[in-house]
Image (tube, rainbow, N blue to C red):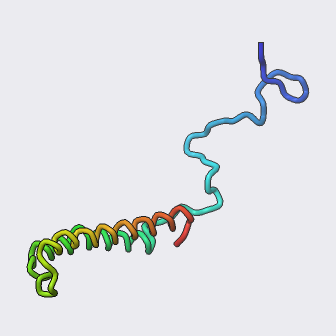
Amino acid sequence: MSSDTTSGGETGTRSDAYVHRPGETDIGRDEPEPKGFGNRGWILVAVVALCFLVVPGAVYLVPSLPAEFGVPYLAAMLALPMLPAVLLGLVAVWSMTAATRGGD
């Protein structure tokens, strides 16, 4: 047999009870909503475009380019995909750590 009581001994609802109001949140009331990607987001977009469009396009259109610099073909085809992957990973981590810290 439990009932909510106030400090005066009257039965009713408690004034400090949690009430869910859809659309309201206590998180970040003092901070404005972020708008857009910011500088770090656009740098990430540029690196994604470089990694998925420019580097594979260069390998497809000019496969003999690394041989002109003295790099064997097989080594170039193994290393060229690795460089954009490392760059993309580093930039993704850099942009996410800034986003979680509230940077930019």
Q: Residue furthest top?
A: 1
Q: In the image as oriented, which residue stretches furthest toward the bottom?
A: 69
Q: How many marks?
A: 0
Task: Give x and y (percent) for residue 31.
Answer: 61, 62
Residue at x 22% of width, y 69% of height = 81
Residue depicted at x 43% and y 67%: 37
Image quarter (top left, top right, bottom left or bottom right) of the N terminus: top right
Q: Position of residue 7 (x, y in %)?
A: 89, 29
Name the image quarter holding residue 48.
bottom left
Residue 100: give x, y in percent of width and height.
Answer: 53, 61
Q: Nearer the viewer, residue 96 or 68?
A: 68
Where is residue 49 shown, x and y percent of the image? 27, 70
Side (left or right) of 87 relative to 2: left
Q: Quadrant of residue 86?
A: bottom left
Residue 98 relative to residue 26: left or right: left
Nearer to us in this view, 53 or 90: 90
Q: Is residue 27 above or below residue 70?
A: above
As drawn, is 88 to the left or to the right of 96? left
Q: Residue furthest right?
A: 8
| Residue closer to the observer: 45 or 24 | 45
Q: Nearer the viewer, residue 64 or 2?
A: 64
